[in-house]
DNA sequence: GAAAATTTGTCCGTATGTATT
DNA sequence: AAATACATACGGACAAATTTT
């Protein structure tokens, strides 16, 4: 883990160091011992005072990534990433397979509204057309993985929020509303820092990264049935695209 | 642009605001006027003092993204975010089309080495097989977009570094070495904070996010010809997957 | 063209956070 | 634990340039 930290960039040194250690952990840099190097060693590596390293480790401890034990050192509590294949048949629940036991989708809120320019464009509706909006969070074994804002054409899927709340899955909710199958048409992927609302929903700490997907699903005739903006906790997932 | 900024996270408010405005610009939020809202309006939106907004705009001005004119407002100079379609025929240089004038790939370094476990698995070679490694940075109109570490089977593409240095493109370098066509087989996408080396190569500041792709290309017979780990400056790009 | 309103630029001072010693 | 230095953030006031009335 070479390279010094930089000062006066708007990012506190303790945060830069926390980010670097978090990354090193997920890259498996300390797999040999299962521990982070001693604070004095880290301080020397990064060229900072030991107090600053302690601030960084305190933040990581708060996130549950490490656990400091007096007299022994700072132990790593490791977690694996879930893999999400993005294909024509992308499903949230399936595809996870043996990576987690239980996948659940929870409805945080919903409402009917008029499609703004962006939603209308993706759903191929006239601007102002009625749409159902849902706010959801999805969990793997009770660990939050992503939260999403998703829209459906209101005339076709009026009962969506109730169906989703019962089924805890878009696929099963669609089935209940008479749509037996659907396909992923387009996915856009970006990344950014998580906003306040998502931090809470995903149980993240400030500064955490989210992978953002904008995705559109259609029925088998190619008619858009869903547009969703999903935010995935970046350190818990990866996407794969098979061509 | 909803969502307040967060205090005492180790990330300065001006930095959070700069990131949000940069993102809003690249999303086309201010396309109507070609200008950022007045400082006082932004200050109210984010719930901070005008001086803090000014710090954020000063950073964006430094990056060349906006230009402030006394009495008029803050003009948008450059919209970032290039779109990279990820398809079976993913190319870095092409696909960009009219988004930038000149796409160049620069060779930072190279060498021959033995494939480690990961590289061998992706290239479907026996571990320890000789491979060519190249470190590259790719620029759109002289602005760095991504940097990559990429491996090729050494027996088949011994002249790769020299060919790439001359052609400034993987596609053209392959062509020169007798491989007329190739296809993208698999892409993995994650996100993380940029590491020190990449910060420098991509002209980013600490705390910046990179989208990381691990990609494997094959020839038309399905034989792996390249494995690459690329880091894209997250606020300059987005990926799209069309199914 | 003149006056008013808007918007960015600069200065002062104070309080708090960050990092070192 | 305490003292020091610097960065960050706020609040107010006014100047300078531009646009609107």
Image (cartoon, coloured by chain):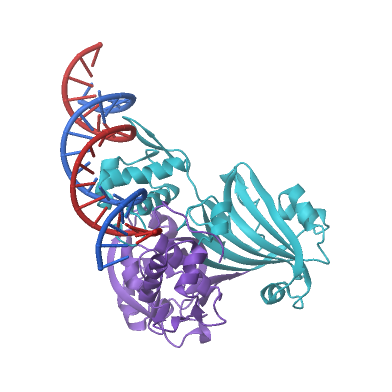
Chain colours: A purple, B cyan, C red, D blue
Residue shown at 43% from the left, 67% from the top: A18
Which quadrant holds residue B127? bottom right
Vertically, is B76 above or below A213? Answer: above
In the figure, is residue B151 to the left or right of B71? right
Which quadrant holds residue B179? bottom right
How many tags in the picture? 0
In the figure, is residue B216 to the left or right of A10? right
Residue shown at 68% from the left, 62% from the top: B150
Which quadrant holds residue A75? bottom left
Q: Position of residue A179 (x, y in %)?
A: 43, 76
Vertically, is B102 above or below A66? Answer: above
Pick whichever, A207 or A220, lies toward us: A207
Inspect this view and state whether residue B37 appears: yes
Pick whichever, A43 or A187, lies toward us: A43
Q: Position of residue B36 (x, y in %)?
A: 36, 41
Inspect this view and state whether residue A22 appears: no
Quarter of the image with the C terminus of chain B is bottom right
Q: Position of residue A231 (x, y in %)?
A: 41, 67
Pick whichever, A93 or D17, lies toward us: D17
Q: Position of residue B133 (x, y in %)?
A: 72, 63
In the figure, is residue B73 to the left or right of A25? left
Residue shown at 38% from the left, 40% from the top: B32
Pick whichever, C12 or B73, lies toward us: C12
In the figure, is residue B1 to the left or right of B170? left
């Amino acid at each position: 883990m070479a390279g010094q930290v930089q000062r006066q960039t708007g990012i506190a040194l303790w945060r830069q160091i926390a980010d670097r250690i978090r990354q090193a952990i997920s890259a498996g840099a300390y797999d040999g011992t299962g521990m982070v190097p001693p604070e004095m060693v880290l301080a020397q590596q990064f060229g900072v005072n030991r107090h600053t390293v302690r601030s960084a480790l305190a933040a990581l401890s708060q996130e549950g990534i490490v656990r400091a034990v007096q007299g022994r050192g700072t132990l790593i509590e490791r977690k694996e990433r879930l893999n999400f294949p993005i294909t024509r048949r992308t499903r949230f629940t399936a595809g996870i397979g043996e990576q987690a036991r239980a996948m659940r989708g929870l409805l945080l809120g919903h409402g009917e509204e008029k499609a703004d320019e962006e939603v209308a464009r993706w759903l191929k509706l006239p601007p102002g057309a009625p749409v159902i909006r849902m706010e959801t969070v999805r969990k793997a074994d009770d660990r939050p993985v992503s939260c999403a804002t998703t829209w459906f054409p209101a005339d076709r899927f009026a009962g969506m929020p109730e169906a989703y709340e019962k089924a805890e899955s878009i696929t099963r909710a669609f089935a209940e509303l008479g749509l037996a199958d659907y396909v992923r048409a387009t996915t856009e992927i970006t990344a950014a820092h998580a906003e306040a609302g998502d931090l809470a929903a995903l149980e993240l700490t400030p500064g955490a990264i989210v992978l953002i997907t904008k995705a559109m699903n259609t029925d088998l005739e190619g008619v858009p049935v869903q547009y969703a903006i999903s935010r995935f906790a970046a350190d818990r997932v990866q996407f794969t695209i098979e061509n």
